[in-house]
Amino acid sequence: MKVSRRSFLGHSAALGALATMPSIAGAHSLLTEPLLDASSRLTATHWGIIRAYVEAGRLARVVPFEKDAFAPSPVIQAFMDRVYSETRVRYPMVRRDFLKNGAKSDRTERGRGDFVRVSWDDALNLVAAELERVKKTHGNTAIHSGSTDWHSVGKLHNSPVLLRRMLGLHGGFVDNTGDFSVAAAMVILPHVIGGTEVYDQQSAWTTVLANTDLVVLWGATLLKNNQIGWEPTDHTAYEAMKALKEKGTPVVSIDPRMTDTAKYFGAEWVAPRPNTDTALMLALAHTLYTEKLYDEKFVETYTVGFKKFLPYLLGTKDGQPKSPEWAEKITTVPADDIRKLARRMAKGRTMIMSGWAIQRQDHGEQSYWMLVTLASMLGQIGLPGGGFGLSYHYANGGSLTARHVALGGISAGENPVAEHVPYARGLSDMLLNPGMTVDFNGEKITYPDIQLIYWAGGNPLSHQMDRNKQIKAWQKPETIIVNEPYWTNTAMFADIVLPANTTFERNDIVSVSEYSGRYVVAMPQLIESQHESMSDFDIFTAISERLGFKDKYTEGKTEMQWVESIYDEAVAAAGKEGLEMPAFNDLWNGDGYFEFPVPEDAKNYVRFGDYRKDPIANALGTPSGKIEIYSFEIEKFGYDDCPPHPTWIEPAEWLGSDKVAKHPLHIISPHPKYRLHSQMDNTWLREVYEVAGREPLWINPDDAKARDINNGDVVRVFNDRGALLAGAIVTDRIRQGVVMLQEGAWYDPDKPGEAGALCKHGNINLVTLDKGTSKLAQGNVANTAIVEVARHKTPAPPVTAFTPPVGA
Ligand SMILES: Nc1nc2c(c(=O)[nH]1)N[C@H]1C(S)=C(S)[C@@H](COP(=O)(O)OP(=O)(O)OC[C@H]3O[C@@H](n4cnc5c(=O)[nH]c(N)nc54)[C@H](O)[C@@H]3O)O[C@H]1N2
Ligand SMILES: Nc1nc2c(c(=O)[nH]1)N[C@H]1C(S)=C(S)[C@@H](COP(=O)(O)OP(=O)(O)OC[C@H]3O[C@@H](n4cnc5c(=O)[nH]c(N)nc54)[C@H](O)[C@@H]3O)O[C@H]1N2
Ligand SMILES: [Mo]
């Protein structure tokens, strides 16, 4: 990815402003002198494989892996700054009142930053004692391991897995189901196409390049989001993107804002009101049907339930045809444009590439269900270059899959507790309402009474919707324990904070990438553990020792023995497949990576190609074995907010509702360009994108003018749930009525620990809505929120988000 002009300017400005910017302590790491005595090793991160240079024991520079030279992520340049950040947790620390009063502490003091340094021994004893106490007093169903979050890559130092392994051996814990990324998709899609789909390999880019006549990006930011992956990524999709642009394949981008990706492709921009995509898709389907452009044979052969959906589409049941005119009123996209787009999509080979934001919204199940229905009517699912793809924007979905064996890794083991909670519901609702029963995909879930939360890897006090509600919820449990390398929002709200080390400070191994499986990369320790930090593996081993099950936890293996055995298992599995891999020592002491071969036929991979060829032998995992446009299973659930076929249902908040009289702007929160959520915000990269020292808010010139807001102003973004300060970017790259604030800026309350405090720095989740998508998936609705924005007239308070607690 190229560094844009804007970022280049911001970058120079950062250097110029250095003297007045003491908070960016590591900015000088931009200017390392030529390294004459450095040694280098490969390692891997969410942003890809990198070569790291160490000089005099310090991480001095990183460069992209030689085979990732085409489109490495610029973010890697800030790793030095993060490792040596002022925000590192240096020692184990305990909240002062918790140290004094334990379970009877004043929990309203959480988040105020009043911590006391303790020894590792005291900290570990305290953690073990708390786990035992809560188990004895309240039972294992009072213990919650929230994190299924992003942590760092590596098959051993996988902090959420390591945490679960320890809590499982301790008798169990309440776990989450689903995640924040694709919660609605993962529940609705198995009903519709028999699998979760979003984390599956998509039709190879080569088939798109060769066959696609029209690419429709539906809220999909290929350039921005493909920088990273849950596993390290190889960035090969960027070569395909460049080829697509060079070929000149027409691209349409359906998104309330003009994205970098749309700009790169010179895409036509369709900008519906946020959260109205289902209505737009219905109108496209209506046109396909009424103009006889739909593929009757595909629908008949490969789907069920179309006839039961049709009366709704045509309005024979409710008197309202889902026509382009109907959709224009909802989406504001002109009816004629909708008709033209439908005709274009039907005319040639069309690939709909959707991002995930359209299911991270109220009734997010419907947009995906309708997307599959629309693609079914176009009849190109399973054909080269046609159909739909739900992860072209993520981890290089669509890259070529190697003939490979993926590394296994340490396992979470057994969890004797069966109780679980849909992830986003567990962060506030479960804590606030023990004993309450809610629906979830045909199940009834009763919220347990949680008294201990343990988090290792993840920043829920940044990522969860409705911060002020969450702060009250996080005052409920008796004990909160967090392992973290940095003083994040979540660490600030804990009772016990244990300093975790980083990728560069431990030995590990990993597969790259999750779709292509092309490499295995050794991740040797490069520098000493900073301050008193330890690896999560060592932390949980030490706790397990105090709880009496250390041998079960470690299986008698050291860190390096684990790394080696994880690799050796893969070598054995590969052997069975006739694939040869080097011996561990050769990998570790040699090049540090191994590359699997990519077979020629990977280039022809077409998702659902087998199903299309033989729908009986390759039946889908749905009850009918076919694509379900009507689901009898969902009908049986009888949910009022998730009918048995795709349906437009008004979101709780949107631009068409009466509520806009008070809060007239819809706010969306895409994932950040130069961060991974909150990760990397504590580096000089902030200087590249911040405005007036805050997270930037995109606002349309008309909306800005009406509020007397100019480019660069500090603005207040607010609704009845909360308020935050941001820096305005006035731009016609966002449609009127919509504002955009990336998720993940560090929360910076003006009154630490208090619900209702103003966030001085721009964390989006002060204003978002905490609600389930529906009774079916109970996913989060991050992109469903309305706000008002005003110029902040008094001098803006200084940002203190990156100042660690006193004494830390
Ligand atoms: N408004 C809004 N909110 C959103 C979203 C949105 O679109 N809009 N998106 C949602 C989505 S999809 C997601 S996935 C979530 C992401 O939410 P998170 O996954 O919670 O976000 P991160 O900021 O990546 O948090 C990872 C944390 O792990 C820590 N960490 C890294 N390595 C290690 C390690 O080795 N050990 C330990 N113990 N800790 C480590 C990092 O320092 C960091 O604090 O946010 C969600 N929130
Ligand atoms: N650089 C970077 N890449 C990332 C991440 C990151 O933090 N940083 N996070 C990773 C993770 S955890 C995830 S889950 C994925 C997320 O992947 P996505 O969920 O696909 O990504 P987003 O950036 O949230 O949203 C994509 C686009 O949807 C648009 N959008 C928002 N609301 C609507 C709407 O109502 N209708 C339409 N049509 N468009 C809408 C946004 O403007 C944005 O341009 O990205 C991954 N990749
Ligand atoms: Mo995500």
Image (cartoon, rainbow, N blue to C red):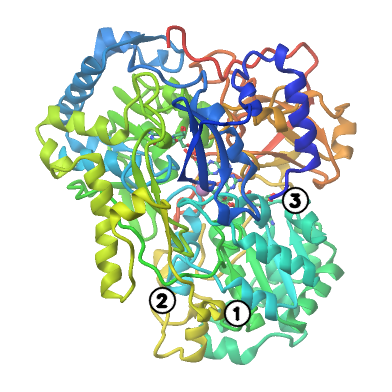
Q: Which numbered disc flags the more N-terminal residue, 2 or 3?
A: 3
The residue to which callout 2 is attached is 622
Give how far across and how far down residue 541 sits, in percent: 20, 33
* Quadrant of the image containing the C terminus: top left
Q: Is residue 599 above or below residue 423?
A: below
Crowding at mark 3 (Cα within 10 Å: few <14, some 14-19, many 20+): some
**In the picture, residue 498 is in which quadrant?**
top left
Q: Is 368 or 593 nearer to us in this picture?
A: 593
Q: Secondary structure at mark 3?
A: helix
Q: Secondary structure at mark 1?
A: helix
Q: Which numbered disc flags the more N-terminal residue, 2 or 1?
A: 1
Q: Is 656 or 686 nearer to us in this picture?
A: 686
Crowding at mark 1 (Cα within 10 Å: few <14, some 14-19, many 20+): many
Task: Say left or right for 251 vs 721.
Answer: right
> Which amino acid is tagged 3?
Asp
The residue to which callout 1 is attached is 376
Q: Closer to us: mark 2 or mark 3?
A: 3
Decide if residue 740 is in sight here. Answer: yes
Q: Is 28 or 758 nearer to us in this picture?
A: 28
Q: Is residue 386 above or below residue 682?
A: below
Residue under the point 39% across and 59% down? 441
Q: Is 220 or 209 nearer to us in this picture?
A: 209
Give how far across and how far down residue 253 sits, in percent: 75, 61
Q: Which mark is residue 260?
A: 3
> Which amino acid is tagged 2?
Thr
Q: Secondary structure at mark 2?
A: loop
**Cβ atoms at labels 2 and 3 below 8 Å apart:** no
